Amino acid sequence: MASSRAMLLVMCSSLAMAVILSSTSSSAVMAQLDVGFYSKTCPKVEQIVREEMIRILAVAPTLAGPLLRLHFHDCFVRGCDGSVLIDSTASNTAEKDAPPNQTVVATYR
């Protein structure tokens, strides 16, 4: 029951964020991503993401908030680029190694 509510919260929050961002976005960023965008290259991507989110939130429902935060911070400024998943180098500390991202990124290690 709690995992269903957490999943619903994540979905509703993501939808609300998408609506807000699309209504306030400037013309400098013209995202072309929509449902079905990967229908030819990865036809089941939406289903895969949904099932994986359900699986993760069933195990750790408290990750709903941090995942939403991670998505927001990764996507807000220049669009979703997955930069929080890039490893640090000797000359550069990666975004995923920043203290605020440790709770969510640790899930993917």
Image (cartoon, helix red, strand yellow):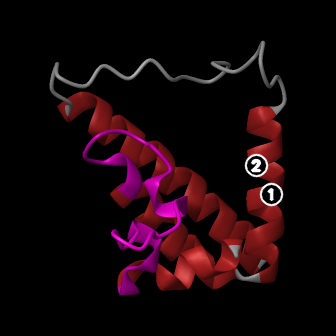
Residue 98 on the magenta span: yes
- Name the residue tied to disc 2: 50
Q: Answer whether labels 1 and 2 touch (C-beta < 8 Å).
A: yes
Q: Quadrant of the N terminus?
A: bottom right
Residue drawn at the location 56% of the way across and 77% of the way down: 104
* Residue segment shown in magenta: 74-99
Q: Give the answer, above or below, for where 2 lies relative to 22.
A: below
| Amino acid on which the number 1 mark rests in the picture | Glu
Q: Position of residue 11 (x, y in %)?
A: 59, 52
- Name the residue tied to disc 1: 52
Q: Compare residues 84 and 92 and report the one nearer the observer.
A: 92
Residue drawn at the location 56% of the way across and 63% of the way down: 9
Relative horizontal placement of residue 42, taking residue 98 as reference (left or right): right
Magenta stretch, main secondary structure, is: loop
- Disc 1 crowd, CA 10 A, few/some/many (<14, 14-19, 20+): few
Q: Secondary structure at mark 1?
A: helix
Q: Secondary structure at mark 2?
A: helix
Q: Give the answer, above or below, for where 97 lies relative to 80.
A: below
